[in-house]
Amino acid sequence: MRRNWTAVVGAIAVALIFTTVSQAQDKPAAKPIRVLLVCGGCCHEYATQKDILAKGLAERANVEVTIAYDPDKGTKHLNPVYEKTDWAKDFDVVIHDECTADVKDEAAIANVLKPHKDGLPGVVLHCGMHCYRSAGFPKATPWFEFTGLVSTGHGKQLPIELTFLDKESPITKGMDNWITINEELYNNAAGKFKLQDTAMALARGKQVDKGKDGKEKVDETIVVWTNTYNGKTKVFSTTLGHNNATVADPRYLDLVARGLLWTTGHLTDDGKPAAGYEGKK
C-alpha cells in the first residue's frame, strides 16, 4: 500500500505547529511586578511626578503600580499608607519618593523599615534620601542604613554632569553619560564619594557653580548606587529627580526602571528586562 508521504509530512507539520501554539497558550503570562509608589510631602510636585513615574515605569517594565500619594506639603506628616503594620504585604517592591525629614518617631520609622529588613526590595528617589531624621542624625540613622548613603543637604539648582562609574552593572550597561537640567546635587555627608560599606557606586555627579567673582566651585558626589540592607535586601537609589522635566527624561526613567528590575531579580546581565517583564512601549 502506497502512502502519500507529502500528505503525511504535511499532517505532522500541522500537528507540530498546533502543539507549539497550544503550549504557548497554556504557558501562563508573567505576573506583573507589584509596585507601591509612596510619594508626597515637602518641596516637590508629587501630584504630577507620581503619574510621570507610574506611566514611565509601565512603558519600560511589566509592573502594576499602586500610588500612595500624601497631599500634605510639610515635612512632619507620615504618609497614611504606613499606619498599618502590614502596609507592604501586597507588594514586591516599594519606591520611596516621599519628602518627610521631620518624621522622627522611632516606632513609625521601624514600621516603615520592617518589611525591608525582612527582605522586601526598595527603590529610593531624590528626597527619599533626606527622610526620617531620627536619633543619630546627621551621622547615622536607621534610614541611612537602608539607603546606603548619608546625605544631609544640597546646594543651588544647577546642571549636573552625570558620569557612570560601573559600566558592567546591568543597571547602567550601555548607558551614556549625560548632563541634566538645573537640579539639586545632594551631598555625601560622610565624606566625598563615601558610601556605607554595604553600598556600591554606579554614577557620580559634578556641578560647577561660578561665583560673582568669576571663580568656579566644583562639587562632585555619588548620585546613583545600590545597597544591600540587613545582609539580604536589594536597594537601588538615586538622588536625582527634583524637577518634573528630569523625572520625565527618558534616560532617568530608563535608569529607575532598570534599578527597580534589578531589585526584584528581573533584569538580565545585558540590562534588559527578563522574559515576560518587558514594558508596554
Image (cartoon, rainbow, N blue to C red):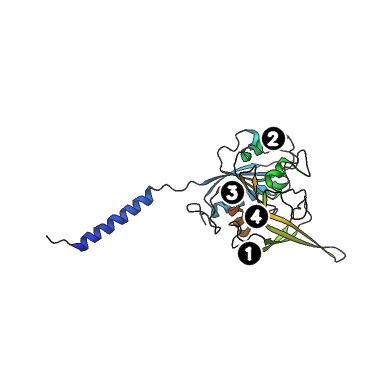
Q: Secondary structure at mark 3?
A: helix
Q: Is residue 143 left or right of residue 95?
A: right
Q: Quadrant of residue 251?
A: bottom right
Label 1 or label 4, whichever lies nearer to me, is 1
Label 4 or label 3, whichever lies nearer to me, is 3
Amino acid of disc 2: Ala
Question: Could you tell me residue 185's position as x and y percent?
Answer: 74, 55
Cβ atoms at labels 4 and 2 below 8 Å apart: no
Cα–Cα gap, marks 4 and 2: 28 Å
Label 2 or label 3, whichever lies nearer to me, is 3
Cα–Cα gap, marks 2 and 3: 24 Å
In front here: 41 or 264?
264
Amino acid of disc 4: Val
Question: Could you tell me residue 150's position as x and y percent?
Answer: 74, 48
Whichever of callouts 4 and 2 sits on the residue coming sooner in the sequence is: 2
Label 1 or label 3, whichever lies nearer to me, is 3
- Report the disc number at residue 108: 2
Q: Secondary structure at mark 1?
A: loop
Residue in the image at 32% along x and 52% along y: 19
Is 258 rendered above or below residue 94?
below
Whichever of callouts 1 and 4 sits on the residue coming sooner in the sequence is: 1
- Report the disc number at residue 247: 4
Judging by the rendered image, the residue that carries numbered circle 3 is 263
Cα–Cα gap, marks 1 and 3: 22 Å
Whichever of callouts 4 and 3 sits on the residue coming sooner in the sequence is: 4
Amino acid of disc 1: Asp
- Report the disc number at residue 176: 1
Pointer 1 local density, CA inside 10 Å: few below 14, some 14–19, many at least 20: few
Amino acid of disc 3: Thr
Q: Secondary structure at mark 4?
A: helix
Question: Could you tell me residue 61's position as x and y percent?
Answer: 54, 52
